[in-house]
Amino acid sequence: MPIDYGTDYDISGKLTDKGDLKTVSYIDNVKQSIKRQVETLQGVYSYISPFYGNIALKLFGLEDNIQNRRYVGMLFEQTATRDPRVYEAVCDYDIPTKKYTLRCKIITDSDINQEILIEGQL
């Protein structure tokens, strides 16, 4: 039985030719879902789950050093791996620019490891 990665509305707000909101499915839905969660302050959607979101967004004014970069990256990784479709995540986070690169391995129907890349800036 194939894995259902879900479908959701495209957060870009783009419309179809018929004027409906576009949707994202499969890998694009996984990317969008993870990006939304890591860029949401944990607790904002506590009615969904007290764990939805990223606690790293509460950490402002950190000194730019390797320990803090690793710590914030680890918090991004923990947030991403809460998604049951993700089994591994590695994050590089740059404190001065607040840019991140998140590489996630997702569960697939085959033995091939599907890696997705999510980049953003907070």
Image: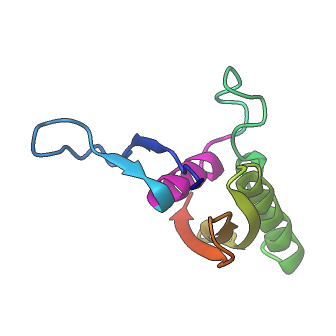
Image coordinates of residue 58 in percent, x first then y, are 75, 45
Front one among 58 and 81: 81
Image quarter hosting the C terminus: bottom right
Extreme residue in the top direction? 47
Does 5 sit left or right of 49 as displayed? left
- Is 81 located above or below residue 96 in the figure? above
From which residue to which does the magenta span run? 28-41
Residue 22 picture quarter: top left
Between 14 and 98, the one lying in front of the other is: 14
Q: Among all residues in the image, which is located at the extreme right?
A: 67
Badge count: 0
Q: From the viewer's perspective, is 108 left or right of 29? A: right
Q: Nearer the viewer, residue 102 or 60?
A: 102
Rendered view: 74 above or below 39 = below
Residue 47 covered by magenta stretch: no
- The x and y percentages for residue 110 are 64, 72
Apparent side of residue 75 relative to residue 17 in the rendered image (left or right): right
- Across and down, in percent, residue 66 comes to 84, 79
Q: Position of residue 79 (x, y in %)?
A: 75, 52
Dominant secondary-structure state across the stretch colored magenta:
helix
| The quarter of the displayed image where residue 90 is located | bottom right
- In this view, the residue farthest toward the left is 17
Q: Is residue 62 visible?
A: no
Above or below for 24 versus 47: below
Residue at image location 70% in from the left, 59% down from the top? 86
Q: Quadrant of residue 49?
A: top right
Residue 6 visible in rendering: yes
Taking the spot 39% from the left edge, 50% from the top edge, the residue there is: 24
